[in-house]
Image: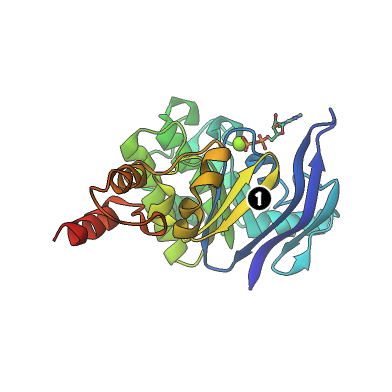
Amino acid sequence: MNVIEAKNITYKYPDGTTALNNINFKVEKGDIVSLLGPNGAGKSTLFLHFNGIFTPTSGEIFINEKKLEQDKKSLLEARQTVGIVFQNPDDQLFAPTVEEDIAFGPLNLEKSLEETKKLVESSLKKVGMEGFEKKPPHHLSGGQKKRIAIAGILAMSPEIMILDEPTSGLDPKGASQILRLLYGLNKEGITIIISTHDVDLVPLYSKKINVMEHGAIVKKGSPKEVFGDINIIRSSNLRLPRITHLAEILDKEDAVKLGADSYPLTISQARRDILNKLD
Ligand SMILES: Nc1ncnc2c1ncn2[C@@H]1O[C@H](COP(=O)(O)OP(=O)(O)O)[C@@H](O)[C@H]1O
Ligand SMILES: [Mg+2]
């Protein structure tokens, strides 16, 4: 089942910028899907359509195969089903303490105080931030803020989580912790959509990639299919994963014969493929 579908979405900002130009995008239940694109491609603009923050200039959004309407009840339902974690946690976190911030969503959904307390506890535990309840969010590091922003969304028990560049601005360990967390949430049944331009990380967690450039989706497929299309990757102002680039160089130098459609995308694939060829 498609939990999210965008059909022929076009979006113009009030100043006339066409940020999205006839986008078709689908996400199946249980997937981790990446939207890969350079700055300005339209990733954030597209995401803001998925729980009704933006209304398309033309086209339609479907959530769980039901058209998203703009009345209050439909929007409330959409915001409960689809949780968006913004790129900048400072746009999301606003309460004086971590626990009040996380409690805001459940209380807004009219959960009881007791139930909200439990949701705050379990969400903090999931993101590994127990003990931070009384801290002001602005005293936290970038990675910690991101985890609190994720906890705030988790507390509303969404079916679908959308994360806008969740690893940007994090140190390498922080980035892999966030990805491991998202991977775990996906295993628990949450469908995950991530925007990023981190081509090295994408093949580690995502089996389905959509490449976006200039407000359009220019390529869709598995990591092998997407990074196998080197021309599209480079013309979209992206690059190959470093390890794939190394394989390309070794292949062109005839050091290891791999073939462009079988370049490794991760270190473990490279180890396997290159060692095999050297044997
Ligand atoms: N508020 C705005 N008003 C006008 N143009 C905007 C606004 N926000 C973004 N844009 C433009 O829309 C395009 C897509 O932006 P955005 O969705 O932020 O891209 P991404 O998230 O992929 O970096 C860019 O050309 C950007 O300059
Ligand atoms: Mg963005």
Whether residue 13 sits left or right of residue 181 in the image: it is right
Whether ligand 1 has any atom under 8 Å from the Cβ at mark 1 is answered as no
162 or 148: nearer the viewer: 162
Q: Badge 1: how crowded within 10 Å, few (<14), some, or many (20+)?
A: many
Q: Which residue corresponds to the image point at 57% horizontal and 39% vertical from the top-left? A: 235
Identify residue type, mark 1.
Ile
* Quarter of image, res 65: bottom right
Q: Which residue corresponds to the image point at 23% horizontal and 60% vertical from the top-left? A: 272
Location of residue 109 in the rendering, given as x and y in whole percent from the top left corner = 67, 55
- The correct choice, above or below, for 177 with respect to 190 in the image is above
Is residue 121 visible in the rendered image? The answer is: yes
Q: Which residue corresponds to the image point at 64% horizontal and 40% vertical from the top-left? A: 44
Location of residue 214 in the rendering, given as x and y in whole percent from the top left corner = 68, 39
The N terminus lies in which quarter of the figure? bottom right
149 or 67: nearer the viewer: 67
Q: Identify residue for label 1.
A: 217
Ligand 2 found in image quarter: top right
Location of residue 82 in the rendering, given as x and y in whole percent from the top left corner = 64, 56
- The correct choice, above or below, for 220 with respect to 247 in the image is below
- Residue at the extreme bottom: 1
Whether residue 27 sits left or right of residue 22 in the image: it is left
Number of marks = 1
- The correct choice, above or below, for 168 with respect to 209 in the image is above
Location of residue 75 in the rendering, given as x and y in whole percent from the top left corner = 77, 54
Whether residue 211 sits left or right of residue 198 in the image: it is right
Colour pattern of the rendering: rainbow
- The correct choice, above or below, for 63 with respect to 212 in the image is below
149 or 237: nearer the viewer: 237
